[in-house]
Amino acid sequence: MRWNELDREACSVARTVSVIGDRWTLLILRDCFLRVRRFDDFQARLGITRHILADRLRKLVDDGILRREAYQDRPKRHEYRLTEKGLDLHPLMMALVHWGNVHMDDGAGRPLLHRHRACGHDFDPVTVCSVCGEPVGARDVHVHPGPGDRGPGLIQNGQ
Amino acid sequence: MRWNELDREACSVARTVSVIGDRWTLLILRDCFLRVRRFDDFQARLGITRHILADRLRKLVDDGILRREAYQDRPKRHEYRLTEKGLDLHPLMMALVHWGNVHMDDGAGRPLLHRHRACGHDFDPVTVCSVCGEPVGARDVHVHPGPGDRGPGLIQNGQ
DNA sequence: AAGATGAGTTCTAAAAAGGAACTTGTCAAA
DNA sequence: TTTGACAAGTTCCTTTTTAGAACTCATCTT
């Protein structure tokens, strides 16, 4: 399967992966959440080839995750900012960071902390159920076909 | 920068991305959470080249996310199952699915629903603060250097 | 003896990424 | 007034990865 075929898949994960499932793209997005906005800043921080960076930024703009905005004329200069759609990736980023903090610790402690402005404390992200508000783990969830199902999807839960 | 250099980065996201930041890897993990466990099942569902599938499964095992386990002798047959470390990726997967549901809907409705066993309802994942329990969005979080910081990291929050 | 199964491996061609240098428009300094 | 710097890309060429298809190998089944 080629990558441009992925967005036609029935699965939300597959469609999401077609957009953000690339190493550089994820690192670019991390930097976006750290308020990096300019081409050369991304390039210097990531050590990414300029060529690939240009390509990934273009794709993120095409997908509506970033917007390219002029911050000066003469000479025209642009910066890249997260759209609302892009900002909605925040829970994903938090999950990524948190998993890394827990499982990929190199012994030096956390390089970055997240402070919740509302309560003032450094925190970890916790995923809870939108209905009852209780935390949900992998074993608390039962997956079943929804209205958009169109597969023999092999989702035989149980066991 | 080459991919094998990524795991030496200071950032948790970078280290996490070095492990799961690959399109096939993410899709393989999605299937793992749907209880797919065998080589040929992954291959048939994903349409991935067998060659790459073998490589990705090997890497996931090396990274402690999956474990390869015999389910019969004569002939020896193995299956791949999530370890605890792998199961901890659940919030990430939920975030991925949810973002896709919200932003990549193709109009057919959700192909998969998640039911919270404890409360019995279909739900969406909500990310909350581990300290105060309130939901956190991108704008509610202030990022600042932690004990493992070793950068001129460019994290000038504010503005 | 002739398939079928499961879990891979091997091969070649095509696609993607890495690396480094080059371009373009504008301003600022020597 | 030439020189250099800056920001944001492009171009070109080489090295790696992937795709796609076929092949292997040990065991069951018919």
Image (spheres, coloured by chain):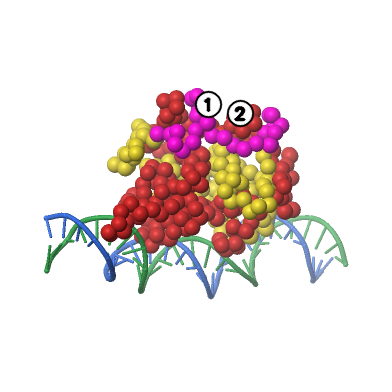
Chain colours: A yellow, B red, C green, D blue
Where B148 sits versus B94, above or below?
below
Image quadrant assignment for residue C20: bottom right
- Residue B48 seen in the figure: yes
Q: Residue at x 30, y 57 (%)?
A: B73
* Residue farthest toward the front in the current orientation of the protein: B73
User: Tag 2: Cα neighbours inside 10 Å, few (<14), some, or many (≥20)?
Assistant: some
- Image location of residue B64, percent across then percent down: 49, 53
Image-based side of B158 in relation to B9, left or right: right
Q: Quadrant of the C terminus of chain A?
A: top left
Q: Is residue B36 left or right of residue D9?
A: left
* In front of the other: D27 or A32: D27
Question: Is A72 inside the magenta-drawn segment?
Answer: no
Residues marked 1 and 2 touching at CB (< 8 Å): yes
Circle 1 is placed at which residue position? A133
Identity of the residue drawn at 42% across and 56% down = B57
Q: Residue at x 40, y 34 (%)?
A: A142
The residue positioned 66% from the left and 52% from the top of the image is: A107
The location of residue B149, given as percent across then percent down, is 71, 50
Magenta residues, as a range? A115-142
Q: Is residue A13 above or below residue A131?
A: below
- What percent of the width, then of the height, locates residue B91? 51, 39
* Mark sitting on residue B133: 2
* Amino acid bearing label 2: Gly
* Residue A3 visible in the displayed image: no
Is A138 inside the magenta-drawn segment?
yes
Amino acid type, callout 1: Gly
Q: Secondary structure at mark 2?
A: loop
Have a look at marks 1 and 2 and say if they share a chain. Answer: no
Q: Secondary structure at mark 1?
A: loop
**Subunit under mark 1:** A
Inter-mark Cα distance, 1 to 2: 9 Å
